[in-house]
Amino acid sequence: MSVGILGKKIGMTQVFTDDSRMLGVTAIEAGPCVILSVKDKHLQVGFDTVKETHLKKPILGYFKKINISPRKVIRQILKNPALEYQAGQELKVDLFKEGDFVDVTGTSLGKGFQGGMKRWHWKGGPMTHGSTSRRRVGSIGSTTTPGRVWKGHHMPGHMGAVQVTVQNLKVVKVDVEKNIMLVEGAVPGYKNGYLFIRKAKKKAAAVKKEPAAAGKAKKK
């Protein structure tokens, strides 16, 4: 088990593989994350420096007490029981390498109040002349039994701005000097949005397979 790391979404770009395939990748500024405190099973880490004038006094007092420059994002993450940690230590992007698969958690784009057709992909009502229910909800009742609207019924409402995790994204490139990593595909959120990156739980790192033998001896 490996700890994760906090990062920031920079944006999307394209890279070419050795076999001339074009991949859409997301650039992520991953770390460095400073360890603020070490607990039994968790690490408290901070990411992205912030001015002291932008913090409330209790939070600022906490950073002065531990003698670490203020960080904008603070989060608890699981620690690796096989390793030893200490306050002030930095977690960097070298936790990952090319070929690894990662799970990325972020906050999805907020889309405000939306109707059911966009929010839940309703088919919609008749589009013929005279129809008054083209994009409306329609009937939501259930007669006299139970005589109410079922809990969880799909309705218009606020869309987006929720925590989303995208799993099994392949790490294409890691730049340790610049704390940048490229992952294949899209990640949740907007540019400069904060992310949490950890090794994939459901998929192992990609392993290059050796070419198969040219042929096998035939049986007589």
Image: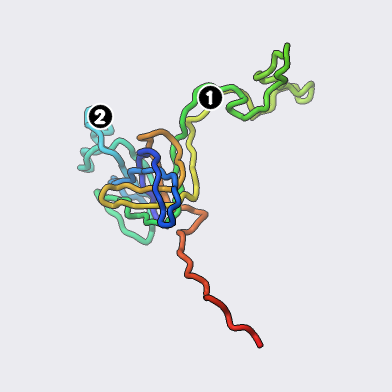
**In the rendered image of this protein, does residue 79 appear above or below residue 190?**
below
Residue at point 38%, 44% (across, down): 76
How far, Cα to Cα, is label 2 from label 1?
A: 34 Å
* Crowding at mark 2 (Cα within 10 Å: few <14, some 14-19, many 20+): few
In the rendered image, residue 102, in percent from the top left (x then y), is placed at 44, 51
Residue at point 39%, 48% (across, down): 15
In the rendered image, residue 36, in percent from the top left (x then y), is placed at 28, 45
Q: Earlier in the sequence, mark 2 or mark 1?
A: 2
* Crowding at mark 1 (Cα within 10 Å: few <14, some 14-19, many 20+): few
Residue type at the position of mark 2: Lys
Residue at point 32%, 45% (across, down): 45
Secondary structure beneath dot 1 equals strand
Q: Is residue 35 visible?
A: no
Q: Nearer the viewer, residue 182 or 81?
A: 182
Q: Which label number is shown at residue 57?
A: 2
Instruction: Quarter of the image for the N terminus: give it.
Output: bottom left
Query: In the drawing, does residue 37 fall left or right of residue 204?
Result: left
Q: Residue furthest front?
A: 20
Q: Nearer the viewer, residue 171 or 56?
A: 171
Circles 2 and 1: CB atoms closer than 8 Å: no
Query: In the drawing, does residue 164 fall left or right of residue 51?
Result: right
Which label sits in the foreground, 2 or 1? 1
Q: How is the image coloured?
A: rainbow
Residue type at the position of mark 1: His
In the rendered image, residue 38, in percent from the top left (x then y), is placed at 32, 50
**In the rendered image of this protein, does residue 117 appear above or below residue 37?**
above
Question: Which residue corresponds to mark 1?
Answer: 158
Secondary structure beneath dot 2 equals helix
Residue 9: quadrant of the picture: top left
